[in-house]
Image: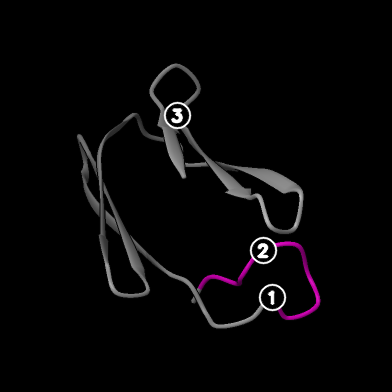
Amino acid sequence: MTAARADCGLRLWAPHRGAAAALALGAEPHCLLTAGDTLLVGHAGGLLALRFTPGDGGGTFPGFV
């Protein structure tokens, strides 16, 4: 997982699956923090929490709740 201020998004990598994806945030990320299965993204407007679900649900990446 990386954050990009230039395009206000996150980049997700799953090397063991050979996959990558981009997630648009709509706000410039300032910091990232993980807490268990939750990714916290700090930005000028506050905090965004994304929780990863186990498995990939048939998709490329784990789902978000």
Q: Residue 61 location in percent, x, y?
A: 67, 63
In-front residue for pair 11/6: 11
Picture mark count: 3
Q: From this viewpoint, which residue is outermost toward the front? A: 16
- Disc 1/disc 2 C-alpha distance (Å): 5 Å
CB atoms at circles 2 and 3 under 8 Å apart?
no
Residue at x 75%, y 62% (from the top left corner): 60
Q: Which residue is drawn at 69% across and 75% down?
A: 56
Magenta segment boundaries in residue numbering: 56-64
Asked if residue 48 is positioned above or below residue 4 in the image, the reply reads below
Q: Which residue is drawn at 60% across and 47% down?
A: 13
Label located before the other in sequence (2 or 3): 3
**Magenta span includes 63:** yes
- The amino acid at mark 2 is Phe
Task: Decide: is 12 above or below 26.
Answer: below
Closer to the camera in the image, 2 or 28: 2
Instruction: Tell me whether the residue at label 1 lies in contact with that at label 2, contact meaning CB atoms closer than 8 angstroms.
Output: yes
Residue under label 1, please give it.
56
Q: Give the labeled residue for mark 2.
A: 61
The residue to which callout 3 is attached is 8
In this picture, residue 17 sits left or right of residue 62 = right
Q: What element carries label 2?
A: loop
